[in-house]
Image: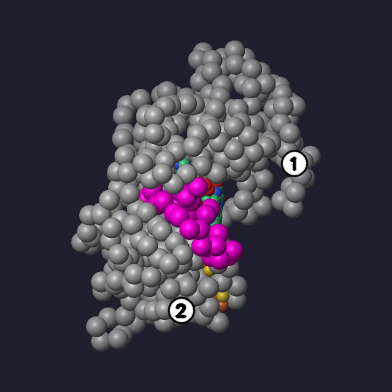
Amino acid sequence: MVMRASISFTLNGQAKTLPADATPTTTLLDWLRNDAHLCGTKEGCAEGDCGACTVVLEEPDGARAAVNACLLTLGQLDGRSVRTVEGLKDAHGHAHPVQETLAECNGTQCGFCTPGIIMTAWAHQVERGEVHEALAGNLCRCTGYRPILDAFSRIEPLAPTPVETPSPMAARFEAPSQTFYRPVTLAELVALRTAHPTAMLLAGGTDLGLRFSEHRDTPPEVICTLDVAELGVIEVLPEGMLIGAAVPYRKLLLLCETEPGFLGFAELLRRLGSRQIRTMGTLGGNLGTASPIGDALPPLLALGASVRLAGPDGTREMLAEDFLVDYRRNALLPGEIIRDIWLPRPAEGALFSCDKLSRRHDQDITAAGLSVLLAVTDGRITTARIAHGGLGPKCARAVAAETALEGAPFTQSSFDAAAQALMGEITPLGDLRATAEYRKLAAGNLLKRLWFRWSAQEAV
Ligand SMILES: Cc1cc2nc3c(=O)[nH]c(=O)nc-3n(C[C@H](O)[C@H](O)[C@H](O)COP(=O)(O)OP(=O)(O)OC[C@H]3O[C@@H](n4cnc5c(N)ncnc54)[C@H](O)[C@@H]3O)c2cc1C
Ligand code: FES
Ligand code: FES
């Protein structure tokens, strides 16, 4: 592997090369504030929740993707182009129109959240979509959102302008206390994983990033998957979609919004974190955590998705439900990584819904999740696949509820019976977010509610 000595990236349009001893898991936020002395980017929570640290990645196709600088590491930034609030002024030092609009609309008071909101707005100029969705990752504690929303509604849309970026090159950054690998092929990744079984495997870092930003960990070895070509694959076929493990949610969401059969998944993905989190977070990372509250997991199980693993002995494939072994335990063997995920396309006319219940609509942790895929023929349910999240030690199929629905007539009483079966088979815990009793009842009600949602649809 070529050993590049230093991390390089483009900052506000200028090439930047860091000293060879820069620690690759330093967060961009720390580097901006402590080393580059660009203190416009603020630190609020240091865990991806508040958006005060929002900066924007400028993609080669001209897209602008908002991201949390508190979770993004310098090693991940290598080869990319990033813009901070300091990089918005024009050649004469005048403020950007987005900044002027926010000020004119009285969208700022103490100003602490303002640079983050400005950067979200600057990305939104090109990305468009729902304003509510764009702002879900930015908290303002004092101004109130009405003037901020006013400003967003006045911001001029812009067409993307492609940005020149170098092609990814394999790299190994050696800092005194850390080696950071950036392989670009699957073969390199598997060889590194085999040779360094205890190294941290880092994708988007939206889970692992807390180790750097909050816990100030400096793992001695890190292998980053973001540039591995095979893990970035997206293949759309009539039977389904193949999604590389390192494809960010941002791209997956765009696909699911337009590909027939996946709209239910898109609705859930829009509530997974915020735009900033979806810029970096990946499906492979969600599977890697095997968390019982991984939001993308119940949809995978309901769809019958399978996971392809790659390791020193080649590749093997298994159903996503078998990959999730137990509480935060997955089926990866030493030296193995997740290569890609196959999402079978629901049959035409199938009913597919992915619900997430949380205390807050945006940016919140799931109290109960339920994904359901049904096929109905001549008023009878022919196939039922139901999967839950947050209701036991792992995301899992709800087999009793499926059995209650399969072969049953498509009626309210069938859904009521299935809800009873579901409540009987789950073992939720109580915590700060919800009691065990609430979770049980809510899970049953999520299933009952589908009857009302679907029976109202003409297709059935
Ligand atoms: C503010 C905030 C909000 C969030 N909101 C949500 C939410 O609403 N719903 C939700 O489900 N999650 C949420 N998350 C968690 C996180 O975004 C997701 O779990 C995401 O899918 C993690 O992906 P990643 O690429 O960032 O993973 P990383 O943090 O890079 O890695 C996570 C784990 O997966 C492993 N891994 C990554 N790629 C591979 C691979 N190819 N093969 C094997 N193992 C691999 C890593 O080793 C690690 O153990 C949130 C996180 C934050 C900080
Ligand atoms: S500092 Fe709060 S999201 Fe980064
Ligand atoms: S202006 Fe004070 S937090 Fe938003």
State whether residue 82 appears in this view.
yes
Q: Is residue 200 magenta?
A: yes
Left or right of 124, for residue 414 = right
Q: Residue at x 45, y 78 (%)?
A: 33
Is 291 rendered above or below residue 18? above
- Kindly identify which residue carries mark 1: 429
Q: Nearer the viewer, residue 345 or 318?
A: 318
Element under disc 1: loop
The image position of residue 380, as x and y in percent, is 56, 14
**N-terminal of the two: label 2 or label 1?**
2
Q: Quadrant of residue 348?
A: top left
Q: How far apart, in angstroms, are the residues tagged by discs 2 and 1?
A: 42 Å
The image position of residue 259, as x and y in percent, is 36, 36
Q: Residue at x 29, y 71 (%)?
A: 17
Going by the numbered disc 1, the residue's amino acid type is Leu
Q: Nearer the viewer, residue 310 or 59?
A: 310
The image position of residue 340, as x and y in percent, is 39, 36
Span colored in magenta: 198-226
Few, some or many residues within 10 Å of mark 2 (<14, 14–19, 20+): few
Q: Quadrant of residue 344?
A: top left
- Kindly identify which residue carries mark 2: 34
Q: Residue at x 64, y 31 (%)?
A: 447
Which residue ends up furthest to the bottom in the rendered image?
Answer: 92
Q: Is residue 398 magenta?
A: no
Going by the numbered disc 2, the residue's amino acid type is Asn
Element under disc 2: helix
Q: Nearer the viewer, residue 358 or 71?
A: 71
State whether residue 133 appears in this view.
no
Circle number at residue 215: none
